[in-house]
């Protein structure tokens, strides 16, 4: 698998995680969404940063992140 393919696969993984998270959040009551505003904002920032930096990341790093479940949550928990 080439470097470009790994970057595309990683970006697809991040986009899918974002979509799944949004779907879960939008099922909450408006007050709960408001209470999670900081978390939502941080997770969006993390996702955007990962998408922007993925083309600069080493292939080995991307391979590790590909097998890590919930990459965005992983970074958010350590934010």
Image (cartoon, grey):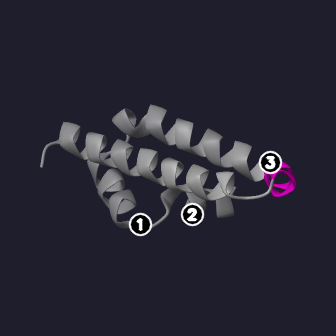
The answer to whether mark 2 and mark 1 are in CB contact below 8 A is: yes
Residue nearest the observer in this picture, 29 or 10: 29
Q: Quadrant of the C terminus?
A: bottom right
| Residue 38 relative to residue 55: left or right | right
Find numbered disc 2 in the image and state the secondary structure of the residue it sits on. Answer: helix
- Which residue appears at 29% of the width and 41% of the height? 7
- Which residue appears at 73% of the width and 58% of the height? 28
Find numbered disc 3 in the image and state the secondary structure of the residue it sits on. Answer: helix
Q: In the picture shown, does residue 8 fall above or below 28? A: above
**Residue tagged 3:** 38
**Residue tagged 2:** 74
Span of residues in magenta: 30-37
Residue 20 image position (x, y, % from top left): 51, 55
Q: CA distance from mark 2 to mark 3?
A: 16 Å
Nearest-to-viewer mark from 3 and 1: 3
- Which residue appears at 37% of the width and 34% of the height? 56
Tag of residue 60? none
Residue 22 image position (x, y, % from top left): 59, 50
- Which residue appears at 35% of the width and 45% of the height? 12
Q: In the picture shown, does residue 70 fall above or below 1? A: below
Residue 78 seen: no
Q: CA distance from mark 2 to mark 1?
A: 8 Å
**Residue tagged 1:** 68
Residue 13 image position (x, y, % from top left): 38, 51
Residue 55 image position (x, y, % from top left): 35, 34
Marked residue nearer the N-terminal end (3 or 1): 3
Label 1 packing within 10 angstroms: few (<14), some (14-19), many (20+): few
């Amino acid at each position: 698998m080439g470097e470009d393919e790994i970057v595309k696969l990683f970006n697809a993984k991040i986009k899918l995680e974002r979509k799944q998270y949004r779907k879960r959040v939008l099922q909450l009551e408006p007050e709960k969404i408001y209470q999670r505003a900081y978390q939502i904002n941080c997770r969006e920032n993390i996702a955007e940063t990962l998408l922007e930096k993925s083309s600069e990341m080493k292939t080995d790093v991307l391979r590790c992140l590909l097998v890590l479940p919930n990459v965005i949550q992983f970074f958010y928990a350590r934010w």
